[in-house]
Amino acid sequence: MFSSAATNWGPDDGFYGTRVMAVDLDLGVIETVSTQSAGATFRGETPVVSADGRYVAFLTTHSLYGSGWQVVRKDRHTGEVKVASSDAAWVPANNFVQDDGLAISADGRYVVFVASSSNLGVATGGKDQVIVKDMLSGQVALASVKSDGSPSDGYCNIVPRMVSANGRYVAINCDGTLAPGVIGRQTWVRDLQTNTTELVSRVGANGPASTAFTYGLAMSPSGRFVTFRNACYGGLGQAGGSCEGNSGVYLRDRQTKTTYPVPRPAVIPTSYANYCQASSVSDIGTIVMACAYKSDGVNQRSQVFVYVPSPNDLGQGTHQIISVRGADGQPGNNDSGYSLAVNANGLSMVFESKASDLDPDDTNGRSDIFILADESMFTDVIFADGFEQP
């Protein structure tokens, strides 16, 4: 599932903006998802999809669904499109809906987004708050909540991989103070079942919070692990006892209440320590992340690495670069990892890349999606079979 501005996905339908697309790798079927029930295509951005592929939530500016940016959810079985950024009566948000982040639970029931709207039935205080919509009941809940039940007094945000599979846990970034004495942009987890908010960017069970801003979050499907970007000087630990050993990504185990600095990939020189950022984490702690890397010694490119932790110590493990050419295993010739993900068991990964040499059939000169699958451990480009025409 991805968004694309390409115009050659099929017969000309008269729409020339960005649309949401689905590719079924088993059936070889290509489908435009951002369509009305009558079949007309409309603008769609930043899609997220349920585990079975049935439900797709995405951002749109189509006036049919409200003013400005709105979040909608498409049922690919029935064709129904419903506004997720809405109140309990399904009235669309009346104010700013953040246009670069949303998430969906594995069953597609819960859609998480950010808005400062005043008509959603939850207090926002006029600031960006993390909001959860139950697409079955229509109910709306606030995730960026202080211990006294009031909304965050700062701005909050999310990214696609910030909700657990069952929709119970939501990882959030907030500038505001969600707990007494904790300041700055921190990482939190909201438990929607117990109505509690937990600080994640901290040392140990009850240690101090990071003194540096955190961002670039991801949560494992089970909700046990959270990864985030943090500077070494934030006080959350050093891999190998030195900031030069840090990748820049931290792993929080919510079960053991331990925060680990993820080590820097050995092939990356110490001068590029702490340069890894975008990440995704599996239920066993496997992390896929994008890291700055001068593979040719001259040009700095973002490359995608997978980190496999030791079962006995999540802060120790091995790295492997996966944004590589199939012919010789060398890193790609352009940036990779602007978007990426790993599945629950840590064996299948997907990433976006601008590199033109990861696949010999990649001739379109555009950003493409690549998959590393557990069945055959192959890397392949989805944008192929006729779509690689210039």
Image (tube, helix red, strand yellow):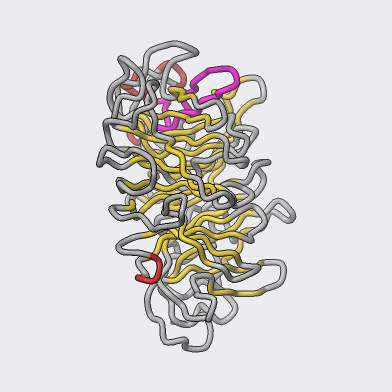
Residue 67 on the magenta segment? no
Q: Residue at x 49, y 21 (%)?
A: 259
Q: Where 181 sits versus 150, above or below?
A: above
Residue 290: x, y in percent?
44, 45
Asked if the magenta segment contains residue 252, the reply would be: yes
- Answer with the quarter of the image where residue 283 lies: top right
Closest to the observer: 89 or 280?
89
Counting from the top left corner in percent of width and height, residue 23 is at 60, 68
Side of 310 where 146 appears, left or right: left
Of residues 226 and 315, the one nearer the viewer is 226
Q: Position of residue 254 (x, y in %)?
A: 55, 23
Q: Residue at x 33, y 51 (%)?
A: 98
Point 65% across, 33% down: residue? 284
Q: Which residues are magenta?
A: 245-263
Which residue is at the far front? 89
Q: Position of residue 342 (x, y in %)?
A: 58, 46
Q: Quadrant of the C terminus?
A: bottom left
